[in-house]
Every structure is written in structure tokens, then in C-alpha cells.
Image: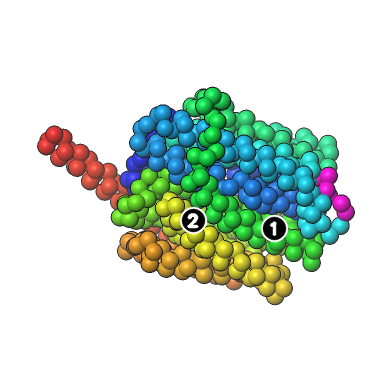
């Protein structure tokens, strides 16, 4: 079940495709759930779910010390050494810190429930809701620690299976409760979904590394390196969740729950569903990058290959989405959600830049450079809040899409420039060429989808999609085939000399 480090194009494509396929299945199941939930609860109910989720995510990230992410780096490095004793001992450290942060987060949620209610909602008293949601904070912390263990140990297939069963569990839990209890069932559903994911995760994690209570005394003091990196990740996560929290709270107070629900729907349709390609980043890419974090040439090679695969895979999807979105929204949600079409089309352009910059953005974390990571995230989060507020005041929902797209452009140049100077990251000519080609095709698709109709709309859309898909297939055929041929020749030469 374990996968040792392999940095070939074939490996990157294989696991990006595997986790993309898993994410695709997850999305299909989620689409069914979201469709039914949208019909049962409407935009207002979707907005309420969004507010509760964003608040709990903010609190979770504020208290979990980033263990779910920073532990991956340490476990991955130990896993490459093959020292089972050291791995087992460090896993005790991870589990101890995860449990501690979970209990602290749950207690904090209980104590500041009234504050969260007053800040999040301009109507009613929702303190009891946040009190009842407090166990979810602990569940998320423990689940995050166990997931980090599985990622660092390269349990890629197990993680894929857990993702699928988690989404199926959410479907089975959510639909009957929302059907019988409506919006009153939102809090129980969120907690039960968190519990189901935890049980699925620890089932596999405890099989691999059984829970050991003996010898756990004093392990909290051994995880300070992990915690230091995690704190920076936590602070950046707090800013990120805080940015979304402020944006949604602002929209709720100036426009109402329906606008929050529409904004959240547009965000899900782009940023979240882009996980079809990006889902392999944390699961496969980050552990491999962490294992070679001291070798800048190896880092460059891994990053550039990941950019190429991500960009090539996602480009045909983004072109198709520009034209499909007006037909998809009524099917996935309802006609009440049609006002997000223009917002989504603009956001789709930001995904191209996300595909390019996301692998580079992992460099500070892989190298343990916590201050740089925090700085880059903080600048973006402050900017996105200011820009979204400005954009909504200027052009309502469309303005939020424009604001996020402009922030993506700024973020791309900031991360690229910083990594070039500090970490000696160098994009290959193929990365630059593919980026220019596919971004240009994306802009053409956006213009055709937004400003044409009739035969021009259909013909232009089909032509751009065919060109994008052909370019992707041609590149993959030659890249993967060439790389496999090269590796085969090298193996034969080494075997002769051996």
C-alpha cells in the first residue's frame, strides 16, 4: 500500500489522475447532496451552512497549531529513512498534540459562543448552535493529525478510499435529517459528518500504526519543531479562514443570507471543484517535495512537473466550464442560483493562475520557512478582503469574482518573484510556454462565452475546447512516453555496469 518517492511525469500524472478521479466521484456524490439540500433548504439554508462552516473552520485553524499540515513534512522525512522505530515514536508525538489542540479548540468554542453569534449574525441568538458545534472542532483536530500520518507514510490509496466513504457518509447523514428537520438539522449534520470522517480515518491509521499509550509521557516537548512550523501555518490559516469569515459576514450584514448562499455557491463551483486536479497536491506532491527540501534542483524538477500536469489537466475542464455553467447551475442547484453565472466565469480565469502558483506556494512549507509562508499568505488575505468588499460595492456578485481574479494575478507574481529570489526556483521554458498558451485559450473561451450567442457561441466554444484538449493530449503523449523511454534506457545502462 505504501508508495516510495517517484518524481517521474508518469507518477505525477498517475496520482493526479487517481485523486482527480476520486475527487470527481466525490463531486458527483456531493452534487447529488447539494442539489437535494438546495431544494430542501434554499439559498438561505445554504448561506447558513456556509456561515457555520466558515466560523468552525476559522476556530479550528486558530487552535490546531497546523499539526494536520506541518506533521506531514516530519513524517515524510522519517518515512524516507525507513526507521520504523523513529516513525512510530513521532506518531505518538503527532497524536498527543492533535488531542491536546482538539480539546483546547472545543473548550474555546464553548467559551466564546456568544461572541461568535454576535459577530456572525445580525439577527437572533445563535450561541447554542456554536456550543453544540464545539465537539466538531475536536473531531477536526484529531482527524487532521491522523490524516497527516497517512500522507507522510504515502498511504495514497487508503486516503483515496477514505475520501470516497466520507462523502458517501455525508450524503447518507445529511439528506434524511434535512428532509425531516430542515434548517434545524444543520448543526447535527455537521457534527455527525465530522464524526464519520474521524472514524473512517482512524480505522486505517490505527491499522497501520496502532494506538500506543505506553511511552507517551513527555512527548509533547518533542514536537516543538513541528509546532513552530504549524503555528505559522495556523496563523496563515486563521487569516485565510478569517478573510472568508469577514467576507461572508459582510455580505450577510449588507445583503442578506441569500447573497451569502449565492457567493458560496459560486466559490464552490470554481475553487472547490477545481480540487478535481489539485487534490493530489497535499496528498502526494507535498510529501515528495518535503523529502527533498534541501536540494533546490530536485525541488525545481518536482514543482515544474506538477505545474505542467496540473495546468494541462485542468485547462480543457475550464474551457468546457465557461460554456456549460449556465446549463449546469439549474441542474446542480436550482434556477434561483443563476445570478452567479457571470461571477463563476470570471473566477474560472483565476484557476489557471492557481494551477501554476499552487505548487510553488508549497516551497516555504516544505523548507520549514514559516515566516515567509505567513508573510505571503497574510498579504494575499488582507488584499482579498479589501478587494471583494470593493468589488461587491461596485458590481455586486460579478464584482466579487473580478476582485478574486485580480487578487490571483497579484498573488501569482508575488509568489513567483519571492520564490525566484529566495529559493532559486526557476520555471522551465515548457512551463512558461504551456502557461501562456492555455491562459490565452482560457481568455478566448471567456470572451466567447460571455459576449457571443447563437452559432458563434456554439462553434467558437467547440473549437476552443478541441484545440485545448488536443494540445493537452499531444503534450502528455510525448512527455510521459519520452520520460518512460529515458528511464528505461538508464535502468538498462545501470544494470550493465552493475
In the rendered image, which residue does mark 2 sit on? Answer: 370
Residue at 70% over, 48% down? 56
- Residue 245: which disc? 1
Residue at 50% over, 33% down? 91
Question: x and y percent of residue 109 in the render?
Answer: 74, 46
Question: x and y percent of residue 380 in the render?
Answer: 56, 65
Q: Are marks 2 and 1 in contact (CB under 8 Å)?
A: no
Question: x and y percent of residue 496 in the render?
Answer: 12, 35
Residue at 56% over, 47% down? 66
Q: Which residues are magenta?
A: 124-129
- Residue 154: which disc? none
Asked if the stretch drawn in magenta spans residue 155, the answer is no
Question: x and y percent of residue 430 in the render?
Answer: 33, 61
Q: State the residue in front, 423 or 326.
A: 423
Q: Quick one: quadrant of the C terminus?
A: top left
The answer for how far apart the CA atoms under marks 2 and 1 are is 23 Å
Q: Quick check: 243 left or right of 12? A: right
Residue at 74% over, 56% down? 261
Q: Quick one: quadrant of the N terminus?
A: top left
Amino acid at each position: 500500500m505504501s508508495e516510495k518517492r517517484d518524481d517521474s511525469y508518469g507518477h505525477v500524472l498517475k496520482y493526479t489522475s487517481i485523486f482527480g478521479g476520486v475527487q470527481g466521484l466525490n463531486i458527483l456524490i456531493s452534487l447529488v447532496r447539494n442539489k437535494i439540500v438546495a431544494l430542501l433548504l434554499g439559498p438561505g439554508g445554504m448561506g447558513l451552512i456556509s456561515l457555520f462552516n466558515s466560523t468552525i473552520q476559522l476556530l479550528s485553524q486558530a487552535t490546531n497549531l497546523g499539526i494536520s499540515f506541518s506533521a506531514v513534512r516530519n513524517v515524510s522525512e522519517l518515512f524516507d529513512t525507513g526507521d520504523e522505530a523513529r516513525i512510530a515514536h513521532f506518531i505518538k508525538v503527532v497524536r498527543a498534540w492533535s488531542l491536546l489542540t482538539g480539546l483546547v479548540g472545543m473548550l474555546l468554542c464553548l467559551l466564546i459562543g456568544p461572541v461568535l453569534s454576535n459577530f456572525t449574525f445580525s439577527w437572533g441568538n445563535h450561541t447554542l448552535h456554536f456550543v453544540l458545534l464545539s465537539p466538531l472542532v475536536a473531531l477536526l483536530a484529531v482527524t487532521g493529525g491522523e490524516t497527516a500520518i497517512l500522507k507522510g507514510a504515502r498511504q495514497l490509496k487508503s486516503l483515496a478510499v477514505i475520501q470516497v466513504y466520507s462523502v458517501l457518509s455525508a450524503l447518507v447523514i445529511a439528506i434524511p435529517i434535512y428532509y425531516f428537520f430542515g434548517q434545524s438539522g444543520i448543526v447535527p449534520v455537521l457534527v455527525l459528518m465530522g464524526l464519520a470522517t474521524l472514524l473512517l480515518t482512524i480505522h486505517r491509521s490505527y491499522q497501520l500504526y496502532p494506538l500506543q499509550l505506553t511511552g507517551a509521557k513527555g512527548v509533547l516537548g518533542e514536537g516543538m519543531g513541528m509546532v513552530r512550523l504549524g503555528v505559522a501555518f495556523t496563523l496563515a490559516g486563521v487569516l485565510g479562514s478569517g478573510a472568508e469569515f469577514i467576507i461572508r459576514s459582510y455580505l450577510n450584514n449588507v445583503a442578506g443570507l441569500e447573497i451569502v448562499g449565492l457567493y458560496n455557491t459560486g466559490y464552490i463551483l470554481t475553487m472547490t471543484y477545481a480540487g478535481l486536479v489539485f487534490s493530489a497536491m497535499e496528498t502526494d506532491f507535498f510529501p515528495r517535495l518535503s523529502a527533498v527540501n534541501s536540494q533546490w534542483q530536485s525541488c525545481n524538477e518536482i514543482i515544474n512537473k506538477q505545474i505542467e500536469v496540473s495546468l494541462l489537466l485542468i485547462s480543457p475542464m475550464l474551457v468546457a466550464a465557461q460554456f456549460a455553467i449556465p446549463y449546469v447551475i439549474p441542474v446542480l442547484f436550482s434556477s434561483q442560483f443563476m445570478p452567479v453565472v457571470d461571477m463563476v466565469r470570471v473566477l474560472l480565469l483565476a484557476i489557471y493562475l492557481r494551477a501554476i502558483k499552487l505548487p510553488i506556494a508549497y516551497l516555504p512549507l516544505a523548507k520549514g520557512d514559516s515566516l515567509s509562508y505567513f508573510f505571503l499568505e497574510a498579504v494575499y488575505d488582507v488584499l482579498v478582503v479589501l478587494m471583494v468588499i470593493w468589488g461587491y460595492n461596485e458590481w455586486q456578485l460579478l464584482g466579487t469574482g473580478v476582485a478574486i481574479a485580480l487578487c490571483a494575478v497579484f498573488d501569482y507574481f508575488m509568489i513567483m518573484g519571492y520564490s525566484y529570489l529566495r529559493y532559486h526556483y526557476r520555471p522551465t521554458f515548457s512551463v512558461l510556454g504551456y502557461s501562456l498558451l492555455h491562459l490565452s485559450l482560457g481568455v478566448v473561451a471567456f470572451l466567447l462565452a460571455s459576449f457571443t450567442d447563437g452559432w458563434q457561441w456554439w462553434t467558437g466554444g467547440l473549437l476552443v475546447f478541441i484545440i485545448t484538449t488536443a494540445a493537452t493530449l499531444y503534450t502528455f503523449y510525448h512527455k510521459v512516453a519520452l520520460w518512460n523511454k529515458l528511464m528505461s534506457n538508464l535502468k538498462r545502462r545501470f544494470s550493465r555496469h552493475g
